[in-house]
Amino acid sequence: LVFGGVLAATYVTAILARPKYWFGTAVINAFGTIVGVMAVVYLVELNGNEYITERFPSLFNSKSWKWVEENVTNYGALGVVLTSIAPIVLHPLILFSMLAKMNSAVLVGCIFIGRILKYSIMAKMALTAPHLLKYFGGSKLVNATEKAKEKVKDKSA
């Protein structure tokens, strides 16, 4: 299951509630992502690539897959970092990087860096330009951010 929109709205709400701690919140959120990434890496190492491809067949015929493939092939670890900043599910990135024989520790480290950058960008957008959050979760995330900002203002008044 992917709860991207719900988790993004919860993350943005946390940023708005404690704007002074935006970077720490970004790191903690990225760490949570990494726990999931390590679990997927472990399961793929244990059960083979089919563990992912059978559960998410549509991902591997999508534009995202081709984009991930190009980034990892052309840029290696830097491509993994840059791809992890994008608002996409990480399964194709994990699987393709593993198929490319990338070291698991390097893969996890690159995704961690990329996700810290992603969540830092999202935090700064939530605090300064919430309308730009549409690039991370569509108009629902922008609307949720505006509602959360109103609640935070009401509590502080």
Image (cartoon, rainbow, N blue to C red):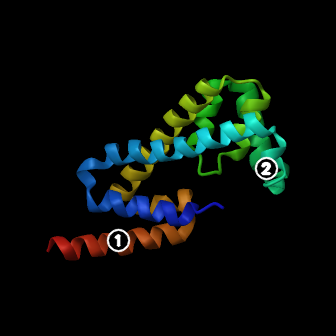
Q: Mark 2 to mark 1: distance in Å?
A: 33 Å
Q: Is residue 126 above or below residue 40?
A: below
Instruction: Tell me where residue 30 appears, x and y as whole percent.
Output: 47, 43
Kindly identify which numbered label has been placed on residue 148: 1
Q: Which residue is mark 2?
A: 63
At x 63%, y 60%, the residue is 2
The tally of labels here is 2
Instruction: Tell me where residue 143 appears, x and y as whole percent.
Output: 45, 73
Q: Is residue 78 above or below residue 86?
A: above
Kindly identify which numbered label has been placed on residue 110: none
Q: Quadrant of the C terminus?
A: bottom left
Say what secondary structure mark 2 lies in.
helix
> In the image, 124: left or right of 83?
left
Which residue extends farthest front?
Answer: 46
At x 62%, y 42%, the residue is 39
Number of residues whose C-alpha sits closer than 10 Å to that of mark 2, classed few (under 14), some (14–19) or many (20 or more):
few
Mark 2: amino acid: Lys
Between 66 and 99, the one lying in front of the other is 99
Say what secondary structure mark 1 lies in.
helix
